[in-house]
């Protein structure tokens, strides 16, 4: 990436699509671009704005689709493998309720909640100063919302490496080793913010890490990028490491919370969701994956006055 301009290849990598799809977007004039010396280039700032605009449009469309469905709730924010499992079990037990979820990252989820684009936000933002998750960020991202923070589970996060950990990666200091390729999470995700915090601690600039700009949107995508030999290391949950049979180096035990407006908390669909989360059948299904702690599951850990 040269400064603030991206080539077609870099834009495709940045967006997580094939180069042909970028050319198709250019041809249909649906993406910010310009030609310099006969080659298409893409201003990074305008691409970021384009992504934000399309994310909001997608959330608005999802809201329009869910409006006629009395039992439907819209969720966005962070990502975890067992969220999909949880929603599947909820459909079995409470078919009258539906949660439509989008992987936007923790901060974008909170912004969407504040703007009224979503009913729920999944979040795991760590405040390094206090050691607290999510609560210290409410005044910044939810200035207009009387919010409730409900813990869903605690989970173990770590560095997932290529089979047999060929670069002997033990911590963040090793990410700048020669030959090591990182697969990163998108800007605004709790995982990306955690990485940036640790890189600052060990005084390694992002520019020194190969693959820092290669972004994906879910923990599974991190694992699959490593499994397909596109990268050597990334941050994801231990559940992904176990499911894909990849080495895991623990770095944090974090709180994964559901944040919503006070009046939404009493929605029957939310109560059904919490009941499903605490059900014996669901817990038994998750147990083989391991490393999930449900000690505070369903508890209100904070409520705005």
Image: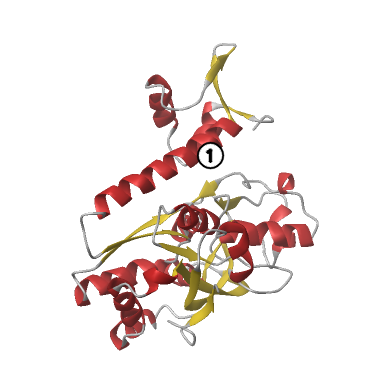
142 versus 40 height, above or below: below
Please tell me in which quadrant of the rendered image residue 265 appears: bottom left
Q: x%, y% of residue 108?
A: 51, 53
Q: x%, y% of residue 35?
A: 54, 15
Furthest toward the top, the residue is 37
Is residue 290 visible in this depiction of the protein? yes
- Quarter of the image where the N terminus is located: top right
Q: How is the image coloured?
A: secondary structure
Q: x%, y% of residue 41?
A: 56, 23
259 versus 204 height, above or below: below
Count numbered badges in the picture: 1
Instruction: Name which residue lies at 48% across and 39% down.
Output: 51
The residue lying toward the viewer, choosing from 90 and 231, is 90
SS under mark 1:
helix
Label 1 belongs to which residue?
14
Is residue 165 visible in this depiction of the protein? no
Give the left or right position of residue 37, taking residue 217 as reference: right
- Quarter of the image where the C terminus is located: bottom right
Q: x%, y% of residue 101?
A: 36, 58
32 versus 67 height, above or below: above
Furthest toward the front, the residue is 305
Q: Residues within 10 Å of mark 1 (few under 14, many from 20)?
A: some
Furthest toward the right, the residue is 203
88 versus 176 height, above or below: below
Instruction: Name which residue lies at 49% across and 85% down.
Output: 296
Give the left or right position of residue 286, taking residue 218 as reference: left
Please tell me in which quadrant of the rendered image residue 232 appears: bottom right
């Amino acid at each position: 990436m040269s400064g603030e301009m991206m080539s077609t290849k870099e834009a495709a990598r940045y967006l997580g699509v094939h180069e042909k799809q970028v050319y198709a977007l250019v041809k249909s004039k649906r993406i910010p671009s310009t030609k310099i010396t006969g080659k298409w280039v893409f201003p990074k700032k305008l691409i970021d704005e384009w992504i934000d605009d399309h994310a909001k449009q997608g959330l608005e469309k999802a809201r329009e689709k869910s409006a006629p469905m009395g039992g439907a709730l819209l969720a966005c924010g962070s990502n975890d493998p067992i969220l999909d499992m949880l929603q599947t079990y909820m459909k079995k037990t409470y078919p009258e309720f539906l949660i439509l979820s989008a992987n936007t990252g923790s901060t974008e989820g909170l912004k969407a909640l504040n703007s009224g684009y979503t009913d729920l936000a999944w979040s795991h933002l760590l405040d390094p100063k206090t050691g607290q998750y999510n609560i210290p960020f409410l005044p910044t991202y939810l200035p207009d919302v009387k919010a409730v923070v409900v813990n869903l589970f605690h989970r173990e996060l770590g560095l997932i490496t290529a089979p047999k950990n060929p670069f002997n990666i033990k911590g963040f200091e090793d990410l700048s080793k020669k030959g090591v390729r990182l697969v990163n999470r998108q800007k605004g995700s709790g995982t990306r913010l955690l990485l940036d915090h640790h890189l600052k601690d060990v005084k390694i600039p992002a520019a020194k890490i190969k693959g820092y700009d290669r972004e994906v949107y879910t923990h599974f995508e991190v694992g699959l990028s490593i499994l397909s030999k596109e990268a050597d290391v990334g941050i994801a949950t231990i559940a992904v490491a176990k499911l894909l049979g990849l080495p895991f180096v623990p770095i944090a035990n974090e709180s994964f919370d559901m944040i919503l407006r006070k009046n939404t908390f009493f929605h029957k669909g939310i109560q059904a969701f919490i009941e499903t989360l605490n059900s014996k059948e669901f817990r038994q299904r998750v147990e083989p994956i391991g490393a999930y702690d449900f000690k505070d599951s369903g508890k209100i850990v904070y409520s705005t006055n």
